[in-house]
Amino acid sequence: MSLARSLNIDDLRRAAMRRLPAPMFHYIDGGSDDETTLRHNRAAFDDWRLLPECLVDVSRIDTGTALLGCRLALPFFLAPTGMSRLFHHDKELGVARAAEKAGTLYSLSTLGTTSLEEVAATIASPKMFQLYILKDRGLTLEFVERCKAARYDALCLTVDMAVAGNRERDHRTGMVMPPRFGPGSLFSFASHPGWALRLLTHPEFRLANVAHRVDALGGGAMGLIDYVNSQFDRSVTWADVEWLRARWDGKLVIKGILSPADAARARDCGADAAMISNHGGRQLDHAPAPVEMLRSIRDRVGAALELIIDGGIRRGTDIVKALALGADACSIGRAYLYGLAAGGQAGVERAIALLQGELVRTMALMGCASIADIGERHLLPAPSERAATSTKGL
């Protein structure tokens, strides 16, 4: 399936599945345990119907918005995702260039295969660096100083990974970093010769931001779960957030918030935004979907925090629903990784363009000429099929 024939994000997912060996595809696609939360992240958007307003001048649609002190052309941006080199040799730089071309923000992961300095030298558009508070606090502080020097607009602290989620697909497919040919994955690599050839011709897989301090991969292929469990700190508390806030004078986002109480704590610690996220269903299974927690979190913090929905976004209608419920913006992860795997930077551009086109069309059909026009009046709760089923025969 060519990029031009990919008409939606699901089409890009299918293209990615064809192009990637099984370990790489399922690393993008999978969740934790029974993947209940993974599925629910998508299904929760179906709990709302869109209510249009007619006879509104929508001859011009403005999708621009302000977020984290930056002016963005779109109300969604590209979330931090680890190890993009696994999926295409364009890696994080191709994603960053696609974000800049679209006029939106790019987020680089601590576990990226491109250094934060290289990204900063490549794009002049808004950028954010995602970090964890590791056992080595000196490394975390080093990230802060490097981001200051590279003029990053924001830091994003991920707080929902005290331990790695139980991602059984990775165990079954033999997912390790860097990739290697093993009994469980040999056939899959052999049946994807294009990807395998690029592995042989471009073999370097480095966690570029930590390789100089943490010999994560120097001992050979290492399971991702082993790496996470060896480097992440279960003792991190809100006091560490305050410690980080005192050392970073730019915008600070806390990623992994799901409860109104935690959103209020983030506000009280001086955060500028909360990314409402369950890590794409890859951490705690049976956690709520981010979009279903949005209204209660907005009610708790008011306008004191910018709120970002992270998880389950596959359509422009999803973005409109999140904005109507009170989000300031949405972030996409899997959606653009499917595009990256399907066609590198061009595939990421295609993913962004598809969502942008759907967003503009939905706004026009809803009678919303700007992002500011979208409100909760445009939503209706969907009838509960479960409730309807339970009352049959009564």
Image (spheres, rainbow, N blue to C red):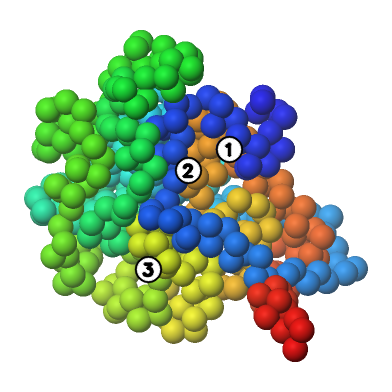
Which numbered disc, 3 or 2, marks the residue closer to the eye?
2
Q: Is residue 19 above or below residue 56?
A: above
User: Where in the figure is residue 266, as x and y percent of width and height?
Assistant: 31, 73
Question: Is residue 246 visible in the rendered structure shown here?
Answer: no
Q: Earlier in the sequence, mark 1 or mark 2?
A: 1
**Residue visible at 74% across and 68% down?**
50
User: Where in the figure is residue 284, as x and y percent of width and height?
Assistant: 35, 62
Q: Residue furthest bottom?
A: 394
Q: Which residue is mark 2?
A: 29
Q: Earlier in the sequence, mark 3 or mark 2?
A: 2
Quarter that holds the N terminus:
top right
Q: Quadrant of residue 159?
A: bottom left
Cα distance, mark 1 to mark 3?
Answer: 27 Å
Cα distance, mark 3 to mark 2?
Answer: 22 Å
Secondary structure found at label 3: strand
Give the camera-side residue of 29 and 231: 29
**Residue visible at 54% across and 32% down?**
17
Secondary structure found at label 1: helix
Q: Which residue is mark 1?
A: 13
**Residue visible at 72% across and 29% down?**
5
Give the camera-side residue of 295 and 36: 36
Give the camera-side residue of 101 and 330: 330
Q: Earlier in the sequence, mark 1 or mark 3?
A: 1
User: Where in the figure is residue 46, as x and y percent of width and height?
Assistant: 66, 65
- Disc 1 + disc 2, Cβ < 8 Å: yes
Q: Say few, some or many: other residues with alpha carbon within 10 Å of mark 2 (under 14 / 14 to 19 / 20 or more).
A: some
Q: Which residue is mark 3?
A: 257
Give amino acid for label 2. Asp
Give amino acid for label 1. Arg
